[in-house]
Amino acid sequence: MTCVSVKFDDVSIADFFDTQVDLGRKPEQFARIWLHSHPGDSPEPSAIDEVTFERVFGKCQWAVLFVVAQDNETYAKLQFNVGPGGHVLIPVEIDYSQDFESSDHDLWDTEFAAHIKANEWPDEGKEPESILADDALNSYALPYDFLEEFEQMEIEERQFILDELANRSELWNPESEVMCL
């Protein structure tokens, strides 16, 4: 999963299903809820999320698409395919105060400190020309090769991203005082 796409590995899903069935579970006990996060502040599912949800969960009697974004923003949709079928949005919130059986906050804090590093952005007091001239700006690029990944996307997915960017002039308009991502 990346900030712009998601694709289930069908072989891995088949292996997961086989393992769960071998353990005596029915698909309705382990394959009804798709919970994932979005890197920004919008939990709204993307068009790709909706297509993927329909492809993977569309035949279930019921399924849930749940998205959590920054600042605890959430989106949850219950889709049902019995009777007349349909879907309903579910108001949800996350209660981080409750432990669960496998929670180990100390280990999580240790792993977080060992592997998560904050990038410092260029000094906001600098003039834009001096920031662009600064070779250190290259260290503020995306943490992976976005262009290579973009080139490997299907043409429809690339077009979707370009259309989304074209509709968000605040991202590229030089007259805009604030750039919102």
Image (cartoon, helix red, strand yellow):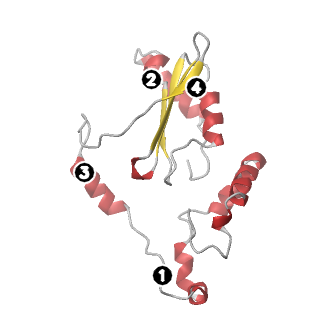
In the rendered structure, the answer to whether residue 26 lies left or right of residue 97 reads right
Check disc 2: other Cα within 10 Å, few if <14, some if 14-19, many if 20+: few
Give whichever of 127, 7 is nearer the camera: 127
Check disc 4: other Cα within 10 Å, few if <14, some if 14-19, many if 20+: some
Looking at the rendered structure, the kind of residue marked 2 is Phe
Label 1, on which residue?
124
Q: Residue at 24%, 48% (x, y): give it.
A: 105
User: Callout 1: helix, strand or loop?
Assistant: loop
User: Callout 2: helix, strand or loop?
Assistant: helix
Give whichever of 155, 69 is nearer the camera: 69
Q: Mark 4 or mark 1, which has the lower sequence index?
A: 4
Viewer-side label of 1, 3: 1
Up-down relation of residue 52 to residue 28 (above or below): below
Looking at the rendered structure, the kind of residue marked 4 is Phe
Viewer-side label of 4, 3: 4
Q: Mark 1 or mark 3, which has the lower sequence index?
A: 3
Circles 4, 1 touching at the beta carbon (< 8 Å): no
What is the distance, in whole Å, between disc 4 and disc 3 at their CAs? 34 Å
Give whichever of 90, 157 is nearer the camera: 90
Label 2, on which residue?
30
Label 3, on which residue?
107
Which of the numbered marks, if any, corresponds to residue 57?
Answer: 4
What is the distance, in whole Å, between disc 1 and disc 2 at their CAs? 48 Å
Q: Residue at 61%, 19% (x, y): give it.
A: 59
